[in-house]
């Protein structure tokens, strides 16, 4: 199990979700992807992406200046 950290601050849609997709493709089952994003649309995007791909959204924190997500690769 490994932790993968992505800093997607400043990227606009579809940049952050594409970075998550790429990381998940290279990750092993059980790895956790940590993402930091400033794109406000990312919250809905990551929830839909996890549902579609079967990966688990462990945490989603929608803060004032950034959104943080933790995704478990399944």
Image (tube, rainbow, N blue to C red):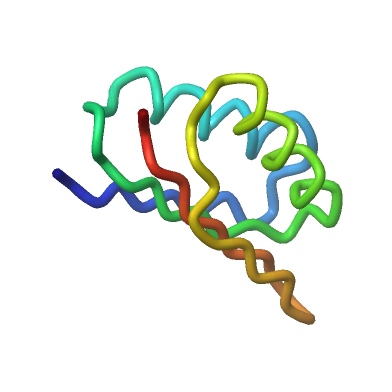
The residue depicted at 60 percent of the width and 33 percent of the height is 50
Q: Nearer the viewer, residue 24 or 8?
A: 24
Instruction: Quadrant for residue 46, please give it.
Output: top right
**Most distant residue in the bottom direction:** 64
Quarter occupied by the C terminus: top left
Quarter occupied by the N terminus: top left
Q: Nearer the viewer, residue 46 or 74?
A: 74
The spot of residue 40 in percent (x, y) is 84, 56
Q: Nearer the viewer, residue 60 or 38?
A: 60
Instruction: Quadrant for residue 30, please give it.
Output: top left
The residue depicted at 74 percent of the width and 32 percent of the height is 48
The spot of residue 44 in percent (x, y) is 81, 45
The residue depicted at 65 percent of the width and 29 percent of the height is 51
Where 49 sits versus 9, above or below? above
Where 67 sits versus 17, above or below? below
**Most distant residue in the left direction:** 1
Where 63 sits versus 22, above or below? below
Instruction: Quadrant for residue 59, please give it.
Output: bottom right
The spot of residue 64 in percent (x, y) is 79, 81
Where 36 sits versus 27, above or below? below
Q: Is residue 70 left or right of residue 42?
A: left
Q: Is residue 31 left or right of residue 61?
A: left
Q: Nearer the viewer, residue 67 or 71?
A: 71
């Amino acid at each position: 199990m490994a932790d993968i950290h992505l800093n997607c601050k400043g990227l606009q849609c579809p940049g952050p979700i594409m970075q998550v997709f790429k990381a998940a493709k290279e990750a092993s089952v059980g790895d956790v992807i940590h993402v930091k994003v400033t794109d406000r649309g990312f919250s809905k995007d990551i929830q839909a992406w996890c549902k579609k791909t079967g990966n688990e959204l462990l945490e989603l924190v929608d803060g004032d200046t950034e959104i943080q997500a933790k995704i478990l690769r399944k």
